[in-house]
Image (cartoon, grey):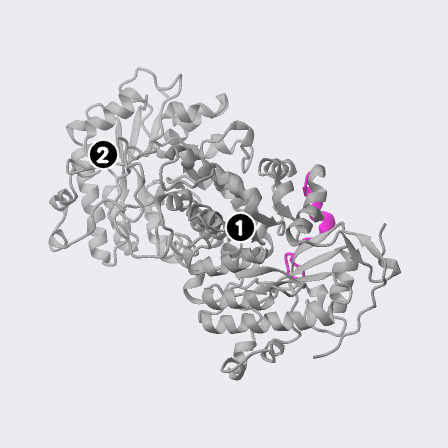
């Protein structure tokens, strides 16, 4: 809790102790195949990827559930943590990619959600799926959706085609069938795919991370243009890398261009901005904290409506809820710190370890 | 070359009150460009010259104003009489910065040849034969896929008084801070020429976003901001403005409101680094006023007018924003409407002062005739 607010961390990143531990949860023949390690190496942060610097030899940061409880629950005041494990990137082999996601789900359930680490009930989870095989992804969602601690589906921000396109519909349909939101988050590992910007390659982590989260907008524009929100009225998408800071400028232009070009997308029924409240959320990120005076919202109350606190733990820019709260108004704090997540993810009303109910 | 009658300007002048930083003159037929090509390009098949622009991701309503068709039915933007009537008289533009439309191609050698032809064409037509009033200025088109040829092209035209900037395609194989473009930046900054980016669609991989190929023109056109944000991040963080202190870049037709959150991110990263590499020598936001300009069209239209004004104040638009119409494209801006969205205290700067300073334009312009005079 922070003040009277229940605090839900909408995205923290657990990992295996070492890269190959994932193989314990994989089936043959993929179990024995080479695949990338968990970390993306092209754009390493100059001060070190994680809180406390880079790793060296010992267990990967984020592999110890007790560290999550210590740093997030006991020190930062977080009540519920939505675990969003990263996978190994967009891989060319659709079956290997799907098996890595399946193994990640099995591992998360066994070692984190159902294990002794979760005796106090702080951990919730995300169903990882690969979009290379949409029918397989739908089956994976159906398999795990009944688990009481799985509260969302997680996919990568990286993609070979924007997410409104028709090949993805079976995946979104499966999520909607179980009333699970889709969290979109940049993956680790090593991906096939396109350059990180629309004009080619960047040369360091600052360039990469200053901009990559804003690529959510291509997916958002695609959802709108293809009428996905119209076809699936209960679909909700969480852009978990952030990008909320760019929302107003980008949506102003989306709205402006939608009107005269709507003839090419007659199945898109509303101005892009009108889909946000019912369909889109953003995780807050440390790089986006704005001074109040500069804040321009895409619609009045957008911060209160659309933003979710997330730690991004254990990355170097881990965000503490108190730091986010410092930039929020009294009207926004309770919703952003936890109220929006409780509602969106249908979390139990009894906050673990506390006497108060939400 | 068809000689076109235009009214003889008088010797009278009027003070400049409106500069249009993005106007697109077009040839009456693309075949006109062929006259200026060298071999082997000159003998290319006809369809090489048939498209004004790539028709991938094309506006469903067409790309040009239907009311800008020429006095004898010519393609919009190709009749200097119509341009004078609509732009100079009708919209009250005193100086127009012309950016010729050069279709992009995946083949950089072909595109370079077309740029060369376009520059020679522009010099002959809109900067000379159609420019008795001396109110048009032009952009040296170069293909950034061949920085070596681009630098040569800049040298070729830098001394011509009609050219006031270099134009590169906003679509590029690498963002513009990348060292491969240093020959372009070196030549442009040495000659005091800003480099303007403008979107000119080609085909192939140049149209890819980081998440693949979108479906509609809407998705593509509405997110120009992300392309420009990528170029800006690169120019600042890859040190192009440090390597070339005289370099200035103009961001055409991509909006500017995204600059506010982007600068906050860049400055925040810079502070977190505390001067450690790879931090730039200066705070990122400090590079903007000396090195970056934006054109206003298509001006943002938030539900709340006040929101745009607040953004303009926050980014100090009076120093960096220049009015543009994008005449004769479908989504052009009428200055009488667009400029009402600019805070009054900034209107003169946005209407003409910032562009006057950037392009070294005279403070007065020649009148077309007596009725065109303004005190």
User: Up-down: is A249 above or below B254?
Assistant: above
Crowdedness of circle 2 by 10 Å Cα count: few (<14), some, many (20+)?
Answer: many
Where is residue B275 shown, x and y percent of the image?
A: 39, 35
* Quadrant where the N terminus of chain A is found in the figure: top left
Residue lying at 67% horizontally and 74% vertically, measured from the top left? B28
Rendered-image quadrant of the C terminus of chain A: top left
Q: Chain of mark 2?
A: A
Q: x and y percent of residue A330 in the render?
A: 49, 21
Q: Residue at x 50, y 28 (%)?
A: A291
Q: Nearer the viewer, residue B74 or A7?
A: B74
Q: Is residue A106 left or right of residue A284?
A: left
Residue A73 position in % (x across, y down): 28, 23
Q: Which mark is residue A269?
A: 1
> Is residue A30 toward the left or the right of residue A346 in the image?
left
Q: Nearer the viewer, mark 1 or mark 2?
A: 2
- Would you identify the image quadrant in which residue B6 lies? bottom right
* Residue sticking out furthest to the top: A355
The reply to whether the magenta stretch includes residue B338 is yes
Q: Main secondary structure of the magenta part?
A: loop
The residue labelled by disc 2 is: A62
Q: Quadrant of residue B103?
A: bottom right
Instruction: Give the magenta range.
Output: B326-343
Asked which secondary structure carries label 1, the reply is loop
Compare marks 1 and 2 and give the one earlier in the sequence: 2
Q: Is residue B211 magenta?
A: no
Residues A165 and A214: in front is A214
Residue B231: where, in percent of width, then height? 47, 51
Asked whether residue B219 is in view, the answer is yes
């Amino acid at each position: 809790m922070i003040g009277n607010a229940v605090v839900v961390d909408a995205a923290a990143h657990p990992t295996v102790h070492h890269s190959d531990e994932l193989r314990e949860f994989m089936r043959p023949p993929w179990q024995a195949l080479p695949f990338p390690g968990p970390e993306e190496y092209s754009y390493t942060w100059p001060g070190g990827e994680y809180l406390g610097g880079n790793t060296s030899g010992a267990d990967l940061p984020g592999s110890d559930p007790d560290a999550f409880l210590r740093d997030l629950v006991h020190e930062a005041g977080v009540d519920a943590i939505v675990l969003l494990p990263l996978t190994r990137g967009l891989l060319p082999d659709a079956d290997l990619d799907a098996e890595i996601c399946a193994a990640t789900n099995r591992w998360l359930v066994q070692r984190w959600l159902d294990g002794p680490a979760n005796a106090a009930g702080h951990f919730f989870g995300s169903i990882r799926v690969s979009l290379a095989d949409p029918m397989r992804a739908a089956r994976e969602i159906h398999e795990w959706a009944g688990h009481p601690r799985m509260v969302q589906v997680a996919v990568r921000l990286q993609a070979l085609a924007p997410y409104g396109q028709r090949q993805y519909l079976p995946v979104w349909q499966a999520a909607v069938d179980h009333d699970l939101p889709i969290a979109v988050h940049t993956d680790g590992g090593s991906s096939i795919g396109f350059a990180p910007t629309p004009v080619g390659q960047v040369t360091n982590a600052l360039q990469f991370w200053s901009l990559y989260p804003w690529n959510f907008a291509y997916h958002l524009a695609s959802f709108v243009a293809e009428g996905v929100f119209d076809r699936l009225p209960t679909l909700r998408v969480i852009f978990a890398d952030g990008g909320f800071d760019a929302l107003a400028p980008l949506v102003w232009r989306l709205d402006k261009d939608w009107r005269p070009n709507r003839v090419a997308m007659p199945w898109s029924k509303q101005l892009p901005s009108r889909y946000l409240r019912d369909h889109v959320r953003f995780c807050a990120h440390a790089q986006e904290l704005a001074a109040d005076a500069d804040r321009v919202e895409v619609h009045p109350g957008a911060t209160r409506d659309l933003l979710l606190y997330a730690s991004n733990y254990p990355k170097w820019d881990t965000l503490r809820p108190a730091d986010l709260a410092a930039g929020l108004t009294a009207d926004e704090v309770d919703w952003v710190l936890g109220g929006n997540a409780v509602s969106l993810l249908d979390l139990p009303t009894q906050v673990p370890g506390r006497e108060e109910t939400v | 070359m068809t000689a076109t009658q235009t009214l003889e300007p008088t010797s009278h002048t009027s003070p400049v009150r409106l500069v249009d930083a993005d106007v697109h003159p077009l040839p009456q037929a693309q075949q006109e460009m062929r006259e200026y090509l060298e071999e082997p390009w000159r003998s290319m098949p006809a369809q090489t010259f048939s498209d004004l622009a790539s028709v991938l991701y094309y506006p469903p309503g067409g790309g040009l104003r239907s009311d800008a068709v020429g006095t004898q039915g010519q393609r919009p933007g190709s009749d200097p009489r119509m341009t004078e009537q609509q732009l100079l008289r009708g919209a009250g533009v005193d100086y127009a910065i012309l950016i010729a439309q050069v279709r992009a191609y995946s083949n950089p050698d072909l595109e370079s040849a077309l740029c060369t032809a376009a520059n020679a064409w522009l010099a002959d037509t809109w900067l000379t034969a159609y420019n008795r009033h001396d109110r048009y200025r032009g952009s040296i088109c170069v293909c950034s896929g061949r920085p070596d040829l681009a630098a040569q092209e800049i040298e070729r035209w830098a001394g011509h008084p009609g050219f006031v900037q270099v134009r590169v395609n906003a679509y590029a194989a690498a963002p513009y801070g990348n060292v491969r473009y240093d020959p372009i930046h070196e030549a442009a900054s040495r000659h005091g020429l800003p480099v303007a980016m403008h979107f000119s669609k080609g085909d192939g991989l140049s149209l890819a976003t980081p998440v693949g190929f979108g479906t509609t023109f809407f998705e593509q056109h509405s997110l120009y901001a992300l392309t420009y944000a990528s170029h800006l991040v690169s120019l600042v963080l890859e040190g192009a403005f440090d390597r070339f202190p005289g370099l200035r870049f103009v961001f055409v037709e991509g909006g500017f409101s995204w600059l506010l959150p982007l600068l906050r991110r860049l400055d925040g990263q810079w502070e977190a680094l505390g001067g450690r590499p790879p931090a730039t020598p200066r705070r990122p936001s400090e590079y903007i006023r000396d090195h970056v300009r934006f054109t206003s069209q298509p001006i943002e239209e938030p539900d709340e007018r006040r929101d745009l004004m607040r953004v303009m104040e926050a980014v100090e638009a009076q120093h960096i924003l220049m009015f543009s119409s994008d005449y004769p494209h479908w989504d052009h801006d009428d200055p009488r409407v667009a400029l009402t969205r600019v805070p009054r205290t900034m209107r003169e700067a946005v209407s003409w002062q910032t562009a006057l300073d950037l392009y070294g334009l005279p403070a007065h312009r020649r009148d077309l005739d007596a009725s065109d005079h303004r005190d």
